[in-house]
Image (cartoon, rainbow, N blue to C red):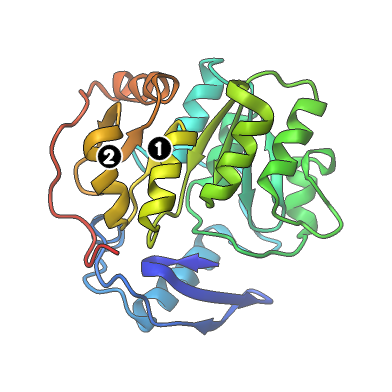
Amino acid sequence: MEALGKSRIVIEDGKVVEVSEPIVKYCPLFKKHRNIEELNCETVKKNIEYRIEHFGMCTENREIKMNYFLNFGISEILSLALTKKMLNAAVIAADGCGTVVLDDPEIVQGMGGRISGIMETEPIQSVIQGIGKDRLLDPETAMIDQFGGVNKAFAMHYSRVGVTVASAKEAQEIRDCFGHNVVIMAVHTTGTSMEDAEKYFEFCDIITACASKTIREVAKTKAVLQAGTKVPVYAASETGAELIKAKLDELGKKPDTTLDAGPSPLI
């Protein structure tokens, strides 16, 4: 997976076997929730080990359902949208299952709420049983293919589908094929090029800023709405704004218009 500060992490048999040096050295979210002052190989490894121990990430002990973790994480927005029937399915990628079609808000939060950018995973039978084999795009390999996941969601007769993407190219392909019956949410945007940042705002409905310099720059002129000031989430369409406003209303908060010191460095 690609996690804290764009560090590449490999987990095998429930053990962290590889951690690369993170590019981003500080994140206010990890400072707030885990009191991590500096992102480095040691603190990243300890955080991943904490997740493995605490909720079984990447193991047979994986917890499937969880409560909210962040105010404005994508899984929190998706979960609320499902609860309020603004969406009737969510396509996410997670450890042990790969791309999966979900309609249970608690499972969306459980599988998506406290993980990082899953680049590759293997099937975990306890996860598959907990979610339902028929909901995986490929239960034999746990492949990650969000376009294929959206296609599966419509084949399952869902009509209003939310999907997470970590590629501007994939966002464009999904929008071109499925139109506006899909709510596209860009995640893991740290290191995004200016060209891809522009594409995200053209083809997505919601975009997480992560530690992206270009997303924050494009948002100055293209964002419809902003939630959060340190690691903001942007609405790139009126549809995205409706989903974020629903979360704001739940929390009794108003949209934000300014930025505070966020991750460092922005890239």
Q: Quadrant of residue 236?
A: top left
**Residue 44: x percent and y percent?**
39, 74
Q: Residue at x 30, y 24 (%)?
A: 248
Q: Is residue 240 above or below residue 94?
A: above
Tell me where residue 251 appears, x and y as whole percent: 29, 25
Can you identify the residue that label 1 sits on?
201
Q: How many marks?
A: 2
Q: Quadrant of the N terminus?
A: bottom right
86, above or below 18, in the image = above
Q: Are marks 1 and 2 in contact (CB under 8 Å)?
A: yes
Instruction: Estimate the x, y position of residue 187 in percent, counting from the top left.
Output: 46, 48
Measured as percent of width and height from the top left, residue 198 is found at 39, 44
Q: Is residue 216 visible?
A: yes
Label 1, label 2: how many angstroms apart (C-alpha)?
Answer: 8 Å
The residue lying toward the viewer, choosing from 167 and 90, is 167
What residue is at 34 percent from the left and 53 percent from the top?
Answer: 210
Q: From where the camera sits, is residue 69 visible?
A: no
- Given residues 159 and 10, the one toward you in this image is 159
Residue at the spot of label 2: 219
Choose top left, top right, bottom left or bottom right for residue 250.
Answer: top left
Q: Quadrant of residue 69?
A: top left
In the picture, measured across the screen, residue 11 lies left or right of residue 60, that is left
Q: Residue at x 35, y 77 (%)?
A: 43
**Which quarter of the rendering shows the C terminus?**
bottom left
- Disc 2 on helix, strand or loop? helix
Amino acid type, mark 1: Phe
Residue at x 42% of width, y 26% of height:
240
Q: Is residue 219 left or right of residue 165?
A: left
